[in-house]
Image (tube, helix red, strand yellow):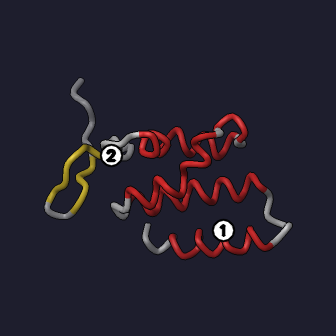
Amino acid sequence: MSDAEPYFRDAARLGEASPVMTREFQDWNRALLALTVRVQHREQEAKNIVCALCADQQGLDLRTRQTLEITKICYLAHSPRGSPPLPGFISGMGPLGMVPAGRPPA
């Protein structure tokens, strides 16, 4: 995921300078950048990136709203205590990082 961060940062920089990139695409790029930063355990930086999007979710396009909902990244922006685990992961760290969640008991 960290390999994607420079791409999203470049897209954000170019989007601000170019009339070609739509607001919808810029918003989606910002949501994806926040997610890449979050999975690198840079919670405060992710909060800063995504807070404006979370404050005005009704003004966002469907793709961006779904990205924010699936990743629960707006919860991160509004929670002083941190964030819930990413989808597909259990809370807590294993010796090699986050431990993938297993299937819930039947």
Q: Position of residue 29 (x, y in %)?
A: 63, 60
In the rendered structure, find residue 52 and report the number of the disc placed on it: none
- Helix, strand or loop status at disc 1: helix
Mark toward the start of the polypeptide (1 vs 2): 1
In whole angstroms, how far apart are the C-alphas of marks 1 and 2?
25 Å
Identity of the residue drawn at 23% across and 61% down: 97
Q: Nearer the viewer, mark 1 or mark 2?
A: 2
Dot 1 and dot 2 residues touching (CB under 8 Å): no
On screen, 56 above or below 92? Answer: above
Residue that label 2 marks = 82
Q: Quadrant of residue 43?
A: bottom left
On screen, 6 above or below 46? Answer: below
Identity of the residue drawn at 40% across and 57% down: 44
Q: Position of residue 65 (x, y in %)?
A: 62, 40
The residue positioned farthest toward the top in the image shown: 106
Identity of the residue drawn at 54% across and 57% down: 49
On screen, 7 above or below 34? Answer: below
Residue that label 1 marks = 12
The three-letter amino acid code for the residue at tag 1 is Ala
Q: Position of residue 46 (x, y in %)?
A: 46, 57
On screen, 93 above or below 11? Answer: above
Task: Name the image quarter holding the N terminus.
Answer: bottom left
Identity of the residue drawn at 21% across and 27% down: 105
Which class describes the residues within 10 Å of circle 2: few (<14), some (14-19), or many (20+)? Answer: few
- Relative to residue 101, is residue 10 drawn left or right? right
Q: Nearer the viewer, residue 7 or 58?
A: 58
Q: Position of residue 62 (x, y in %)?
A: 69, 40
Which class describes the residues within 10 Å of circle 1: few (<14), some (14-19), or many (20+)? Answer: some
The three-letter amino acid code for the residue at tag 2 is Gly
The residue positioned farthest toward the left in the image shown: 95
Q: Quadrant of residue 16?
A: bottom right
